[in-house]
Amino acid sequence: MGSPTITKLSDLVLRSHADYEAVFEHVAAHLQAEGGTIKVVDRAKGMLEASWKYGINPFGLRVTVHFTSPEEGIVELSLTGSFVDAIDTWGTAKKKAKAIAEVLPLPIDAAAWPIREQASVPASTQPAPAGGTVHHRGKRKVLMALLVFFGGGIGLHKFYAGNWGWGLIYLAACTTGIPVLLSLVEFIKVLCLSQEEFDKRYNYQAVRAFQWVW
């Protein structure tokens, strides 16, 4: 079976008219061929994520591929690069995502690169999501921990997470000392979360104003 035809729309966005499953397997093969370790496989939500060693962290650099179906018969791919517990200050993760986008249109034998995942999200055989997209919200664990530690007493971390309702409550109750005690517990909780658990809570679900994320 030949490789699906994929064309670039921009540096980080590609499109294909091929079958979704074929495109999904094709992308997974390229991610592994480029030295990545598959960390997240979710066909239902249209997401693949692979990691590479960066510094002392064996899974420090990550590239996430989101699959959407803007219209019938079209699969659109958008790529993002990020670091685990770090901010992409110098654009290194974005450059990695661009490099992956460059090779995705090239043919590859997907059968030679079966998906070997160390994923926290179970694989699914459901079709590509129709319409809309599942975007990484861009929330960073290190920044969240810093905001909880230094500004938890006035609810800065709640505003950052999108829970602005709780942020206002923390701000209104800041003179009581209760938000400080709560934020100390939250600080420990954030530090204990793995990157996958943090992403699940803060990056891959819609967060409402008065939702308590724990």
Image (cartoon, rainbow, N blue to C red):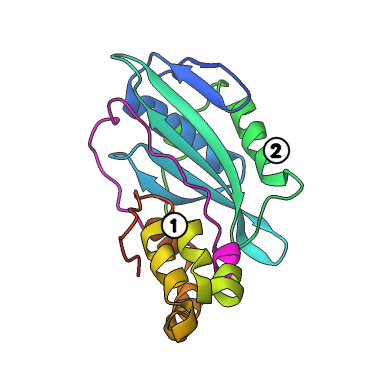
Residue 201, picture quadrant: bottom left
Q: Which residues are magenta?
A: 118-145
Q: Which quarter of the rendering shows the C terminus?
A: bottom left
Q: Nearer the viewer, residue 61 or 116?
A: 61
Disc 2 crowd, CA 10 A, few/some/many (<14, 14-19, 20+): some
The residues bearing labels 2 and 1 have C-alpha atoms spaced at a distance of 21 Å
* Residue 118 in view of the camera: no
Taking the spot 47% from the left edge, 86% from the top edge, the residue there is 177
- Residue at the limit of the structure toward the right, as seen here: 90
Residue, disc 1: 199
Q: Nearer the viewer, residue 55 or 72?
A: 72
Kindly identify which numbered label has been placed on residue 72: none
Where disc 1 sits, the SS reads helix
Looking at the image, residue 128 lies above or below residue 157: above
Q: Position of residue 123 (x, y in %)?
A: 30, 47
Taking the spot 72% from the left edge, 43% from the top edge, the residue there is 91
Taking the spot 42% from the left edge, 76% from the top edge, the residue there is 173
Residue type pointed to by label 2:
Lys
Kindly identify which numbered label has been placed on residue 95: 2
